[in-house]
Each structure stands twice: as structure tokens, then as C-alpha cells.
């Protein structure tokens, strides 16, 4: 590996490291540190020729930004993620960017815009190939976003269908965090939409 390759590898590792640190800061409720670390991760990713790496950082940032920075800031980050995601070959990261943008619209009560973003995400997901570099974002994970958006719009039947589908596939040890997020969404659904979806979503 030449000097340029080593430099790019260093920026890739840095973006991953700072993004992980940002998520850990968010989980420990250090919102100021999370914002700073995501900004640093994005700066490192921005030095790479793969613009979709920057999109991946921004989609992760978007998912925590409603709490740490507010919905308006999250919306701007989500739009940036969509723009950068379209500058590369991965359909998975494009779909993820549309999905997180849909979530932000839902949180803001912009249900029509959320549905439009979700439709784009599903159309993009239909083009996903087996060798996609970001292929860990698959239709089952997208279903989780669909269910969350349905939760914010008050569509109980859709919440049940999509969150249950997503939860059924999260069986591996690496899915532990995602299962926790999904169970939290399910609990919120129960509070908002009633006990009739509790058994299917939480399994009790």
C-alpha cells in the first residue's frame, strides 16, 4: 500500500472511530460530546473519495440529532446525507439516507413528506445487489423505519406489521443494540396507540 492508500485508510479508520465514539457519547447522554464527535467523524470521512462514507456518518448523526440538536438541525443533516449518498454506487446507503430523512419528517409531523421519503427508500432498496458494500442495511431494517414513521403518524396496523417484521430478523448478537432500539419503539407504540399491539411487538 502506497502513501496515498495509507492516508485514505487512516481517514477511514478515524471516521469509524469518531462515529462510534459519538454513538457511545449519545448513549451515555453526553449530547455535546456526541455532536462534536460526529462532526469530527464527518470531517475525516469528507477527506475520502468515497462520498458515501460521509453519507454513512451523516445518517448515523441524523438518528441522534433530534435529541441532541433538534429536529430542524436533524433535517439539514439528513438532506446532506441523501445528497452524498447519491454520489456512489451503494443502493443500501441511499435507501438508508432516505429512511432516516423519513424519520425526521415523521418526528416533525410532516407525514406526507415522510411517506414520500419512505417510498424512495423502498424503490431504492429494490435495486440492492448482493455485493453492496453497505448491504447490512436491508429490507428488514428498512421495515423498522417504516414502522417508526407509522408510529408517529398514528397508524397502529402499520406499526404492528413493520416493527414485528423487523424484530423477527434481529436474531444475531451484533443486532443487540438494534433490538433494544426496536423494543423501545414498540414500548412507545404501546403508550401512544394502545395495548392491542403489545403482545405482537414485545412478546409478552
Image (tube, rainbow, N blue to C red):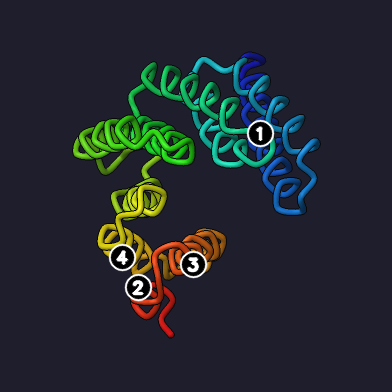
Task: Kindly identify which numbered label has been placed on residue 197.
Answer: 2
Q: Are marks 3 and 4 in contact (CB under 8 Å)?
A: no
Horizontal side of residue 140 vs 32, given as left or right: left
How far is the residue under mark 3 from the one under mark 4?
13 Å
Q: Crowdedness of circle 2 by 10 Å Cα count: few (<14), some, many (20+)? A: many
Q: Are marks 1 and 2 in contact (CB under 8 Å)?
A: no
* Element type at mark 1: helix
| Mark 1 vs mark 2: in front | 2
Horizontal side of residue 128 vs 191, given as left or right: left
| Mark 2 vs mark 3: in front | 3
Question: Looking at the figure, which quarter contains the C terminus?
Answer: bottom left
Which residue is the site of mark 1? Answer: 13
How far is the residue under mark 4 from the one under mark 2?
6 Å
Residue 133 showing in the rendered view: no
* Element type at mark 4: helix
How far is the residue under mark 2 from the one under mark 3?
10 Å
Classify 60 as above or below 80: below
**Image mark count:** 4
The first of marks 3 and 4 along the sequence is 4
Residue drawn at the location 34% of the way across and 37% of the way down:
111
Residue drawn at the location 55% of the way across and 40% of the way down:
63
How far is the residue under mark 1 from the one under mark 4?
38 Å
Residue 127 showing in the rendered view: yes
Task: Kindly identify which numbered label has been placed on residue 160.
Answer: 4
Task: Kindly identify which numbered label has been placed on residue 191.
Answer: 3
Amino acid at each position: 500500500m502506497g502513501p496515498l492508500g495509507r492516508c485514505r485508510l487512516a481517514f477511514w479508520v478515524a471516521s469509524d472511530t469518531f462515529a462510534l465514539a459519538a454513538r457511545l457519547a449519545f448513549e451515555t447522554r453526553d449530547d455535546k460530546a456526541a455532536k462534536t464527535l460526529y462532526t469530527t467523524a464527518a470531517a475525516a470521512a469528507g477527506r475520502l473519495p468515497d462520498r458515501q462514507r460521509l453519507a454513512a456518518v451523516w445518517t448515523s448523526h441524523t438518528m441522534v440529532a433530534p435529541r441532541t440538536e433538534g429536529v430542524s438541525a436533524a433535517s439539514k443533516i439528513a438532506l446532506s446525507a441523501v445528497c452524498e449518498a447519491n454520489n456512489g454506487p451503494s443502493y443500501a446507503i441511499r435507501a438508508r439516507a432516505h429512511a432516516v430523512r423519513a424519520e425526521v419528517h415523521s418526528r416533525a409531523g410532516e407525514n406526507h413528506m415522510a411517506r414520500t421519503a419512505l417510498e424512495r427508500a423502498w424503490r431504492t432498496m429494490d435495486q440492492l445487489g448482493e455485493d453492496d458494500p453497505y448491504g447490512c442495511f436491508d429490507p428488514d431494517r428498512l421495515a423498522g423505519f417504516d414502522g417508526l414513521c407509522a408510529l408517529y403518524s398514528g397508524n397502529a396496523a402499520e406499526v404492528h406489521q413493520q416493527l414485528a417484521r423487523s424484530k423477527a430478523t434481529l436474531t444475531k448478537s451484533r443486532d443487540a443494540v438494534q433490538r433494544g432500539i426496536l423494543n423501545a419503539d414498540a414500548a412507545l407504540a404501546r403508550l401512544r396507540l394502545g395495548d392491542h399491539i403489545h403482545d405482537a411487538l414485545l412478546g409478552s
